Structure formats: C-alpha cells, structure tokens
Image (spheres, grey):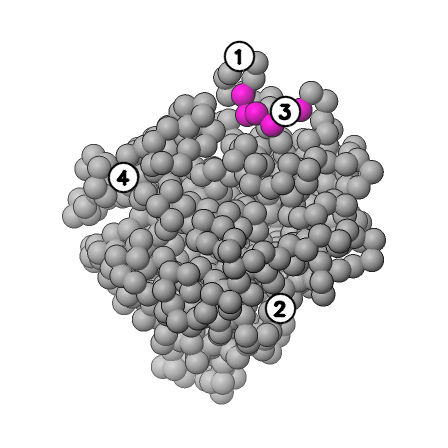
C-alpha cells in the first residue's frame, strides 16, 4: 500500500485532484446527485485521498493551505474556523485555563460564558465543522462498497483493505457525533443513506450517544490491530480510548452510570503497551512529536505541506509574542501573536516555585513538575489578567504566557519547514489521559482497587516530575511526584487533569463532569466579572446555531436558549 504517513497524507489531496474535486462538499447532507467527480474513484489513490480528507478536516481548513482561500466552510473566517482552534475557544477559553481578550467572532462571549444562538460565530463554525467531517466520512462510505469497487474494476486491488477504510471513516464519524453529543446534546442525525432532499431527524442526546457507541463497538475488530496502522491513522487503541472517554462522561451526558465500562476500556489502552508514556512530557508538544509513542491519534501538521493558522500554528503563535523569542526558542521567531494567556487558576494549580521562567533554564529542567511551563520573564509581567485599573486588557504582560507548545525539535532546533507555520502534530488522544480516566473511573465506582488507581496517577506524576524510572541526566529528579492513598481523591484527579492536559481540549468537559463548570467554582472573567461569578446551568450545552434553526425549522433548541 502506498504510504500516507505524516505529510503525504496532506500532500495527496492538497496538491492533486482533491483541490478541485472536493470543493463542493460544503453542504449537508450529500447524496448521489452531489458526489465528487467520478474521476476521484477511478484509482485506489483516489479512495485513499478521500480518506485522507476525512482525517485532515479536523486539522486543516481548506484546499490550498496557509489560509489561502477556498476554505471548507463557506463564509467562515478560514484562520479562525479550523477544528482544534475552534475547540480551544469552546473547551479551554470558557474554563479556568486560558484568556483571550478579543471580542471578534464571539470570543468574548465564550470567555465570559454569555453566548447565545446568534452571537458567537465560533460556536456555529464548530457545529458546521463537525458536520463537514461527517459529510466527508459519509461520502467515502457511499462510494467504498463492494458493488462500486466491482463496477470500477478496483475490487481485486482493494478487497483486502476496503473494510479497513470503511472502519476508519465510521470511527471518525463516531468521534464527530461524540463531540456533538458533548457540545450540543440533541442534534440532527445524518448518515451515508440520507438523501439531499431529506430533512434530517433530530436525535435525542441519548440516541446520539448510543449511535456513536454502537459504531465504535461495531468497527473495533475491523480496525487495524494496535500499532499496525500507518502514522496519523487510527487503530483499535483509538477506538478503546474514545469508548472510555464516552463512558466516563455518560452520567453527565445521558444520566447513565457507565464507569465500569470506562475503566475497562481505559485499562485496555494502558495495558496494551503499544502507546507507552513518553519519557519526557515536554517532547509530546514539539515539532518532531511524530516520533512520540504516547500519541494514539495525532492530527498531522507540516509547516510546508499542511499549513493552517487554525491548527498547532495557533497553539504556538497565540501563546507567545515576539520578545519571548529572545528569551527562549519558540520556533516562530518574531511571528507570535501574543493574544492568549493563562488564567490565574491554571497558574495556581502548580507549586509557586515551579512557575517562574528561568532565562538560564529555558526548558525548565530545574523544575520539580516539568508541566509548569509558563512565561513570567517579560518586563513588568504579572500573574493577574487585568491592568492597574482592574480592567481586562490586551497587554500581554497582564497574565503569564503558556509555553508547552514549541515549534522546535527535542534538540531545540528549528524544523526544516521554518517558522512561518508549525510542524507540530496535535495529540488528540494520548495515553496519559487513559491513565487518569482509569483512575477516576475506579474512584467513581468501577471495580478496580484504590491502590490500582493510585498507581495510575503516580505513573503520570512520576513522568511529570521525571523521577524514578523517568530520571534523565541533567534534569532535576530528586523530588518524587508520587502521592499517598490519603491524598488521592476525585478533586485531586480533576486538578491533575488540569496540569496534565491544559490546552488539550478536555477542560470544559471535565469541569461539567465534576459539577464545577457553571456554579460554585469561579475564575477570571467568568460571567464577565473580574474574579468570576456563577452562570445559568444552560451553559453546560452550547445552543443549536440560529442559522441551523432557520434552515431546519423542525429542530428544537436546547433548554434556556430562545428558539
């Protein structure tokens, strides 16, 4: 099989036929009257290219790259509307992790938890982006059948692989539905059989959950065995991981206790062994992280052939400004935008003596917890995210920068693609999360022991402190990250998830699961108040976008929002 690892994934469709053939896949749903050109399906490479588009729709934004136009979402700002950038606004900025003062495209509404169905473009674009990815998956599933492969003379060439292609598309579609379930709740259901003139039926949140679950269970053994797929593509471990995540959230999503199932699947990820914890936490977020074995599902980026301001380019440039490159190697030189800062609640999650940036130790080798990656060394920089008059400000020195994302290799070298765009793959699923999911599920009632849960947490913390078996020459390892059973609690795990997974698009979901999102737990600028304030519980779901209600009057809006 022709390799589509890493960059060839994106080169295949960005540079060849998909640039023109897939341009009309921006409407939902699709049917056989709206198929891409039959030219695409004359060869096996054509099918591989469409599968590549299913994957890349979650990290890139259009057909030309580099925000060059011909974007996937008609009318959307291409730089803002990439999936992992949109999720940052919804999953991270609306929480106790990060602040971005901008008010464009509804960002201030997300920061303050004050959105509605019409005033936040980033909410609408997230909804549309997920359905766009579903559309690509449905397109492949319509065309990748035994009958059509026979008709096109491709059966002998693809008979041993087409089931796997279909399984991967079904997995990506199930992932998208799981995120719609999380973010929006009750949403329309569209599959490969939905006709273009057919009005999609709105499923309940429970139906969406059960559909995604059934698809993941159905394709588990059709996906490649652990570690046997090409880089950038998923295998059975990704399937187990997503099931674990869904089951862990089942009580807050559909009011059903599925912690035993969450534990079962999270433990499968941990014990399988094909995706061990990285020896150094910091190397997960660098430009050569494609070599990191911990990443179960990475969304591929490349500074030359898969450019976008909406992927990891955002996670470096938005988090740094030009002067920071004089203090450490950001990998983007003076190109930093400097418009995202850590909220005080994220900074305070770490020991105070680990927070300060040392210009003589730019990697933080002397820190106890190597996850405490902040920029505190700019002139007049303060932890508070407000100015002397107690107002929110765009001044980058009001609030600390967060610098775990760096567009350099683990040898601190700029990658060959240069500093215009990043080459960091986004680790959508990684193993440390599975350790923490397994531990949490046990504490919530699964049949593992507390000692086992403690072992999972301590493994993650030992790696963070680089103590024990994670010790490395030249890096501080004299302080153990391990805790005792008397310190282990659900609140401890929530705090640990914040430190381990900050900026990795889980925080809103975590806070809702722990009952600490809308009330009784405040942070900078929540509800538009400097020190935070409670908000209505309706904000545990985003509204169905107003434009979608106009297009489909049969849709029902989420409770608390105007129809």
**Distance in Å between CA atoms under marks 1 and 3:** 14 Å
Sequence-first disc among 3 and 2: 2
Sequence-first disc among 3 and 4: 3
* Residue at the front extreme of this rendering: 486
At mark 2, the secondary structure is: loop
Position of 514 relative to 89 (above/below): below
Q: Position of residue 359 (x, y in %)?
A: 79, 35
At mark 1, the secondary structure is: loop
Position of 103 relative to 519 (above/below): above
Q: Position of residue 304 (x, y in %)?
A: 68, 51
Q: Circle 3 is placed at which residue position?
A: 382
**Distance in Å between CA atoms under marks 1 and 4:** 32 Å
Q: Circle 4 is placed at which residue position?
A: 538
Judged left or right of residue 31, residue 158 is right
**Distance in Å between CA atoms under marks 3 and 2:** 37 Å
- The dot on residue 276 is 2
Residue drawn at x 53%, y 12% as measured from the top left: 389
At mark 3, the secondary structure is: loop
**Is residue 484 one of those drawn in magenta?**
no
Q: Residues within 10 Å of mark 2 (few under 14, many from 20)?
A: some
Overall secondary structure of the magenta section: loop
Is any atom of residue 202 visible in this view? yes
* Residue at the top extreme of this rendering: 389
Position of 371 relative to 93 (above/below): below
Residue drawn at x 58%, y 56% as measured from the top left: 483
Q: Circle 1 is placed at which residue position?
A: 389
Quadrant where the N terminus sits is: bottom right
**Distance in Å between CA atoms under marks 2 and 4:** 39 Å
Please report contact status of discs 3 and 2: CB closer than 8 Å, yes or no.
no
Q: Position of residue 464 (x, y in %)?
A: 65, 54
Residue drawn at x 31%, y 44% as measured from the top left: 541
Magenta-colored span: 381-386
């Amino acid at each position: 099989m022709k390799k589509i690892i890493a960059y060839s994934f994106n080169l295949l469709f960005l540079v060849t036929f998909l640039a023109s053939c897939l341009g009309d896949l921006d409407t939902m749903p699709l049917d056989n009257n709206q198929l891409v050109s039959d030219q695409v399906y004359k060869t096996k490479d054509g099918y591989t290219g469409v599968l590549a588009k299913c994957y890349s729709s979650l990290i890139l934004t259009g057909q030309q790259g580099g925000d060059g136009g011909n974007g996937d979402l008609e009318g959307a700002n291409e730089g803002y509307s990439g999936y992992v950038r949109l999720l940052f606004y919804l999953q991270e900025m609306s929480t106790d992790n990060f602040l971005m003062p901008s008010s464009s495209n509804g960002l201030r509404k997300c920061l303050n938890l004050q959105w509605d169905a019409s005033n936040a473009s980033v909410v609408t674009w997230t909804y549309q982006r997920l359905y766009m990815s579903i559309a690509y998956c449905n397109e492949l599933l319509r065309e990748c059948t035994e009958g059509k492969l026979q008709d096109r003379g491709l059966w002998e060439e693809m008979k041993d692989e087409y089931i796997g292609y279909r399984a991967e598309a079904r997995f990506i579609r199930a992932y998208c539905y799981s995120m719609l379930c999380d973010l929006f709740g009750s949403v329309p259901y569209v599959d490969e059989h939905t006709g273009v003139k057919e009005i999609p039926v709105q499923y309940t949140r429970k139906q969406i959950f059960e559909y995604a679950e059934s698809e993941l269970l159905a394709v588990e053994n059709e996906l490649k065995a652990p570690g046997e797929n090409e880089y950038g593509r998923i295998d059975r471990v990704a399937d187990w991981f997503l099931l674990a995540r869904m089951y862990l959230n089942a009580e807050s999503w559909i009011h059903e206790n599925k912690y035993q199932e969450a534990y079962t699947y999270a433990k499968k990820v941990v014990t399988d062994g094909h995706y061990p914890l990285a020896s150094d936490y910091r190397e997960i977020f660098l430009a050569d992280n494609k070599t990191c074995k911990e990443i179960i599902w990475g969304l591929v980026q490349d500074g030359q052939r898969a450019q976008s301001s909406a992927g990891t380019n955002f996670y470096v440039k938005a988090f740094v400004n030009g002067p920071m490159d004089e203090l450490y190697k950001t990998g983007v030189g003076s190109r930093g935008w400097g418009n995202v800062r850590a909220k005080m609640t994220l900074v305070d999650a770490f020991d105070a003596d680990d927070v300060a940036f040392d210009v003589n130790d730019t990697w933080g080798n002397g820190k106890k917890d190597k996850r405490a990656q902040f920029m505190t060394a700019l002139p007049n920089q303060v932890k508070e995210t407000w100015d002397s008059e107690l107002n929110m400000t765009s001044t980058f020195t009001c609030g600390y920068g967060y610098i775990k994302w760096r567009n350099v290799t683990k040898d601190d070298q700029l990658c060959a693609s240069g500093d215009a765009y990043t080459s960091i793959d986004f680790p959508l699923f990684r193993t440390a999360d599975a350790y923490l999911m397994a531990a949490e599920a046990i504490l919530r009632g699964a049949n593992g022991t507390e000692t086992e849960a403690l072992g999972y947490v301590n493994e993650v913390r030992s790696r963070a402190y680089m103590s024990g078996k994670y010790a490395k020459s030249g890096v501080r390892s004299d302080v153990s990250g391990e805790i005792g059973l008397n310190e282990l609690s659900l609140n401890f795990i929530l705090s640990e998830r914040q430190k381990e997974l900050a900026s990795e698009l889980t925080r809103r979901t975590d806070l809702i699961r722990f009952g600490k999102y809308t009330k009784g737990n405040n942070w900078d600028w929540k509800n538009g108040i400097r020190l935070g304030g409670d908000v209505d519980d309706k904000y545990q779901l985003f509204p169905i976008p107003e434009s979608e209600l106009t297009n489909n009057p049969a849709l029902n809006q989420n409770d608390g929002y105007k129809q």
